[in-house]
Amino acid sequence: MKVRVHVSLKPGVLDPQGRAIHHSLEGLGFSGVNDVRAGRLFELDVAETTTDEALDDMCRKLLANMVIENYRIEKVAA
């Protein structure tokens, strides 16, 4: 089973990478971009028997920093 885990900073957390990307987009002449928030995407290939609880546990223990980040799990059709 393919699973994608989207990790992003919680609202209000300073995002220097997103700010740098936003600044660079402006420098390249792209207008109309009001804000950029950077995040990470993990693609996992796990056994069909992997439970939602196990996926949630992986996120909380390793993939996301629960103090400053949120995550969203997406199961991808094969």
Image (cartoon, grey):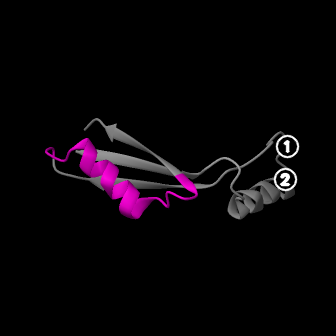
Q: What stretch is highlighted in magenta?
A: 48-69
**Can residue 32 be found in the magenta stretch?**
no
Give neighbour class at mark 2: few <14, some 14-19, many 20+ (Cα, 10 Å).
Answer: some
The x, y position of residue 32, in whole percent, is 83, 39
The x, y position of residue 70, in whole percent, is 52, 49
**Can residue 58 be found in the magenta stretch?**
yes
Which residue in the structure is indicated by mark 2?
26
The answer to whether marks 2 and 1 mark residues whose Cβ atoms lie closer than 8 Å is yes
Residue at 33% x, 49% y: name it.
56
Query: 32 or 72: which is nearer to us?
Result: 72
Residue 18: image quadrant is: bottom right
Residue at 41% x, 56% y: name it.
42
Residue at 25% x, 53% y: name it.
45
Residue 61: image quadrant is: bottom left
Residue at 54% x, 59% y: name it.
67
Give neighbour class at mark 1: few <14, some 14-19, many 20+ (Cα, 10 Å).
Answer: few
The disc, 2 or 1, on the residue closer to the chain's N-terminal end is: 2
Identify which amino acid the numbered label 1 is placed on: Ser
Query: 12 or 24: which is nearer to us?
Result: 12
Vertical side of 20 occupied by 31: above or below: above
- Residue, far top: 77
21 to the left or right of 40: right
Identify which amino acid the numbered label 2 is placed on: Glu
The x, y position of residue 25, in whole percent, is 78, 54
Query: 29 or 8: which is nearer to us?
Result: 8
Which residue in the structure is indicated by mark 1?
31
Vertical side of 66 occupied by 75: above or below: above
Vertical side of 65 occupied by 6: above or below: above
For the residues labelled 2 and 1, the Cα–Cα distance comes to 6 Å
